[in-house]
Image (cartoon, grey):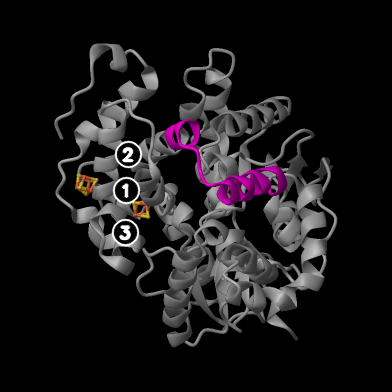
Amino acid sequence: MQTNFTLAQLADPQIAEAEKILRACVHCGFCTATCPTYVLDGNELDSPRGRIYLIKDMLEHDRPADAEVALHIDRCLSCLSCMTTCPSGVHYMHLVDHARGHVERTYRRPAVERFMRALLAWLMPYPRRFSLALLAAIPAKPFAPLAGALGLKRLAAMLNLAPWRGPRAALGPQVYPAAGPRQGRVALMAGCVNDVLAPQINAATIGVLTRHGIEVVLAPGAGCCGSLVHHMGREAEALAQARANIDAWSAVDGLDAILITTSGCGTTVKDYGFMLRTDPAYAARAGRIASLAKDISEYLATLPLAPRHGVSGLTVAYHAACSLQHGQRVIRQPKELLVKLGFDVKDVPEGHLCCGSAGTYNILQPDYARRLRERKVRTIERLRPDVIAAGNIGCIAQIAAGTELPAVHTVELIDWATGGPRPARLGR
Ligand code: SF4
Ligand code: SF4
C-alpha cells in the first residue's frame, strides 16, 4: 500500500514502524473472511482492512482520533486472526497497538466510558484490589439480568463473569523445589487475574513441573504483564508493568525459561523486546526476557511426561485461545500433550474465531462478546465433549459463563493425567 508520510513524521520511530506495516498491506482483503467482527456484521470498517485504512488516514494526517475511529478500533478484539490469514505478513498487532495509544492520547471519550476504563485499569492488574472487587460482586451477581434490562450492559457483563465463590489468596514470591534430582529451573508468571480467578491453574502447573524435576520460582516483584492496560492504549502503564517484570525476572539466576499459563499474557511478554526497543535502559534485557518466555505447553512438550493409568477416555473439546494460536503460533503442543496422555481431543470447528473474551473486551464490548460466546458455545456443545480445555483464563471464564460444560485449563488435565489431583470442575 502506498503511504504519504512526511520525512518529519518518519523521524518518529513509532510512525516509521507503522509506515513499514502499512506498506506491507496489499489490500487483498483475505483477512476479512477470518475477522470475527466482520464475520458477525459484514461491515468493512470492522474488518482488518477497514481498520488499517482508518489508522493510515489518521496517522498520515497527524489527526486526533475521532468517535468513528475510536469505535472501530475499540471493536477490534486484537485476536490476531487476521495476522494468521494475511499472505503479506502485515504485523497488524503492532499497528493496532500503536493506534490504540494514539486514540487514548488524542480522543476524549464520553465520561462514563472514561470512568469504566480507568476503573478496569486500576482494578484488574492488581490482585488485592481485584479480589476485593470479586467479593463485592458476589451479592450483586443475582442482579446481573436487571442491570442488563436497565441498559447497564457493562455492569451486567462484569457480574456475569464474576465467580460465585470468593477469591483465594494469591501466590506470593517463593521457590518450589523439584521433587528428586533437579532437571531445570523456571520462573512462573503467576499473573494477576489468573491467580485470583483460578489459582488451581498455577497449582497444577507447579505440581506437574516439580514432579518432573523442575524447580519453579515465583519472583518477587513480578506482576501483571501489562496487556490489560496495553490493549486499552494506556502505553505508559503497560511499559511500567513490563519494566517491573523485567527487573524481577532479571534478578533470578539460572532460569531456563519464564513460563506463562495465560496465553494473552504470553503474547505480550514475548513482545517485550519490541515494546521497549527504544528504551536504552531496558531494550537488551527486554529482548532477553522475551526470548525466555514460553507458554506452559511449549515447555511441557520438551519434558518426558509420565502418564498414569485411569484418566483416559474423556473427550476434550480443545479451544485454541487466539493469543496462543494467532499471537504465539503455538498450535500443536497443547493437543499433542493431551492426546499423548490418553484424552480424546476434538478440535472446535471455526476454531480460528475468537470466543469474545479478549482481555477487558467482554466488559467493554458486551454485545459483540456475547454474540461471539454464543457462537463458540454452540459449536463446542455440538461436539458433546466431557470437558472444554483452553490455555487462557479469559477464554475459560468467557466460555464457562455460557455453558454447563466444565471448562478447565489444559495444564489442569495434564497435571491430573501425570499424577496430580482431578480438576474440581470435573466433579467426582
Ligand atoms: S490480508 Fe493482509 S495484505 Fe490483505 S488486506 Fe488483510 S492485512 Fe492487507
Ligand atoms: S485482530 Fe481480530 S478483530 Fe481485530 S481486525 Fe484482526 S481479526 Fe479482526
Q: Which residues are magenta?
A: 102-124
Instruction: Verify CB contact (< 8 Å) between mark 2 and mark 1.
Output: yes
Amino acid type, callout 3: Cys
Q: Secondary structure at mark 1?
A: helix
Point 38% across, 68% down: residue: 351
Quarter of the image where the N terminus is located: top left
Q: Would you say the beta carbon of the disc 3 residue lies within 8 angstroms of ligand 2?
A: yes
Relative to 191, 356 lies left or right = left
> Regarding mark 2 in the picture, which secondary structure is present there?
loop
- Is the residue marked 2 within 8 Å of ligand 1, measured from its CB? no
Task: Work out which quarter of the rendered image holds the C terminus and state it.
Answer: bottom right
Q: Is residue 189 above or below residue 144?
A: above
Identity of the amino acid at label 1? Met
| Residue with the mark numbered 2 | 91
Where residue 273 appears, x then y in whole percent? 49, 27
Check residue 385 for magenta coloring: no
Amino acid bearing label 2: His
350 to the left or right of 198: left
Which residue position holds label 1?
A: 83
Which one is in front, 145 or 215? 145
As drawn, is 350 to the left or to the right of 219?
left
Give me the C-alpha separation between circle 2 and circle 3.
Answer: 15 Å
